[in-house]
């Protein structure tokens, strides 16, 4: 878990050096925006790692001391990643609420801003699939099939991450770090879905 925490926190360290922290946390708007960005960065890396954990790699079995422990950690990390991704837009919308409720509402309306729309689609898919997991008793084969749709949520999350104007789009090192995990997670999850 320690290594996963470090890997998930590295983008925050990179992010912290891109602008003075005083400017990032000087008032409520900048603070909530910064917290939203941090949650988005960490959530995306943890989402990627979580898909890798589901890949049934023998080295992970050894590292975690058994497949059952890998899946227990997969569940914990998935919960943390989902929470971070869920709160990512909530913190970001605060800056709009302070001057216009209409602007805040438009932040969550699809097709106003296409990269944000991809994030909304990803979040909706995740909420629906996780609701199935926690609140509806599904047969294992149905649950397993529904879980494969998490790849779709992840794909839209990648599109959101690539095309949204952010520190990820402005800094190559941060961009490549996030996208490396995302591509590995996507490839592993597609391989798992097909085989």
Image: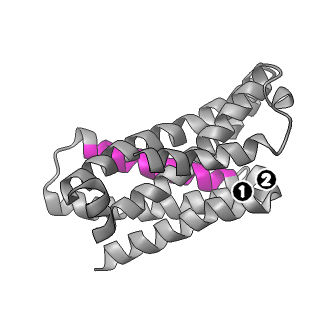
Image position of 27 with respect to 160: above or below: above
Relative horizontal placement of residue 106, taking residue 122 as reference (left or right) = right
In this view, the residue in front, 156 or 34, is: 34
How busy is the neighbourhood of tag 1: few (under 14 within 10 Å), some, or many (20 plus)? many
The boundaries of the magenta stretch are 116-133
Q: Is residue 19 left or right of residue 127?
A: right
**SS at mark 2 in the image:** loop
- Residue under the point 37% across and 77% down: 191
Question: How many labels were placed on the picture?
Answer: 2
Circle 2 Cα neighbour tier, 10 Å, few/some/many (<14 / 14–19 / ≥20): few
> Residue 142 appears at what percent x and percent y?
20, 60
Main secondary structure type of the part rendered in magenta: helix
Query: Mark 1 = which residue?
Result: 174
Name the quadrant of the C terminus.
Answer: bottom left
In the displayed orientation, state which residue is furthest to the left. Answer: 139
Q: Residue furthest bottom?
A: 195
Q: Is residue 19 above or below residue 95?
A: below
What colour scheme was applied to this rendering of the protein? one colour
Q: Earlier in the sequence, mark 1 or mark 2?
A: 2
Tell me residue 68's x, y (percent).
19, 54
Magenta stretch: includes residue 2: no
Q: List the residue tagged with mark 2.
A: 165
Q: Position of residue 73 (x, y in %)?
A: 31, 48
Q: Quadrant of residue 102?
A: top right
Q: Kindly indicate the quadrant of the structure image that contains residue 189.
A: bottom left
Residue 124 is one of the magenta-drawn residues: yes
């Amino acid at each position: 878990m320690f290594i996963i925490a470090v890997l998930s926190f590295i983008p925050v360290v990179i992010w912290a050096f891109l602008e003075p922290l005083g400017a990032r946390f000087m008032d409520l708007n900048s603070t909530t925006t910064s917290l939203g960005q941090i949650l988005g960065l960490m959530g995306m890396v943890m989402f990627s790692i979580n898909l890798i954990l589901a890949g049934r790699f023998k080295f992970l079995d050894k590292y975690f001391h058994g497949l059952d422990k890998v899946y227990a950690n997969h569940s914990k990390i998935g919960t943390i990643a989902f929470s971070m991704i869920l709160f990512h837009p909530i913190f970001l919308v605060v800056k709009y609420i302070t001057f216009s409720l209409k602007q805040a509402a438009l932040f969550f309306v699809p097709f106003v801003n296409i990269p944000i729309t991809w994030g909304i689609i990803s979040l909706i898919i995740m909420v629906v699939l996780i609701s199935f997991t926690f609140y509806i008793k599904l047969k294992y084969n149905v649950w397993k099939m529904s879980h494969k749709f998490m790849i779709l949520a992840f794909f839209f999350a990648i599109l959101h991450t690539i095309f949204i104007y952010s520190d990820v789009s402005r800094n190559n090192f941060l961009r490549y770090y996030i996208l490396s995990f995302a591509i590995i997670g996507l490839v592993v999850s597609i391989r798992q879905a097909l085989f």
